[in-house]
Image (cartoon, helix red, strand yellow):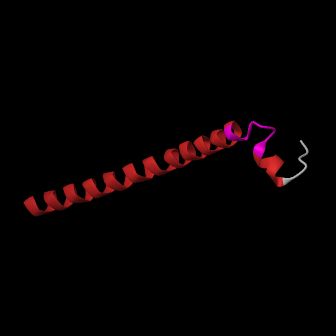
């Protein structure tokens, strides 16, 4: 696809709002799919270490 200028590129043949919003939503979903499991893993490790400390203190 050939564009006359950068403004035409961003407008995407008058479909720019749709195209760029789709790219934005896809980027947000990909970031979410990476961030959430990492956050859950961090919380799991913290809980597990707390539990190990509690069990070590009880013995």
Camera sees residue 59: no
Instruction: Looking at this view, name the residue that lies furthest to the left.
Output: 58
Point out residue 49 in the picture as x, y percentages from the top left corner: 26, 59
Which image quarter is the C terminus in? bottom left
Picture residue at 91% right of the left edge, 45% below the top = 2
Point out residue 51 in the picture as x, y percentages from the top left corner: 20, 55
With respect to residue 27, does 13 lie above or below? above
User: Quarter-wise, where is residue 55 in the image?
Assistant: bottom left
38 part of magenta stretch: no
With respect to residue 45, does 26 lie above or below? above
Q: Which residues are magenta?
A: 11-17
Point out residue 39 in the picture as x, y percentages from the top left corner: 40, 53
The answer to whether residue 48 is left or right of residue 21 is left
Picture residue at 37% right of the left edge, 49% below the top = 40
15 part of magenta stretch: yes
With respect to residue 21, does 53 lie above or below? below
13 vs 39, nearest the viewer = 13
The answer to whether residue 55 is left or right of residue 44 is left
Picture residue at 50% right of the left edge, 46% below the top = 32
Point out residue 26 in the picture as x, y percentages from the top left corner: 61, 41
35 vs 13, nearest the viewer = 13
């Amino acid at each position: 696809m050939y564009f006359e200028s950068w403004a035409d590129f961003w407008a995407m043949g008058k479909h720019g709002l749709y195209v760029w919003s789709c790219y934005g939503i896809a980027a947000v979903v990909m970031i979410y799919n990476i961030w959430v499991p990492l956050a859950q893993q961090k919380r799991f490790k913290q809980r597990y270490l707390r539990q190990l400390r509690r069990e070590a203190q009880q013995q």
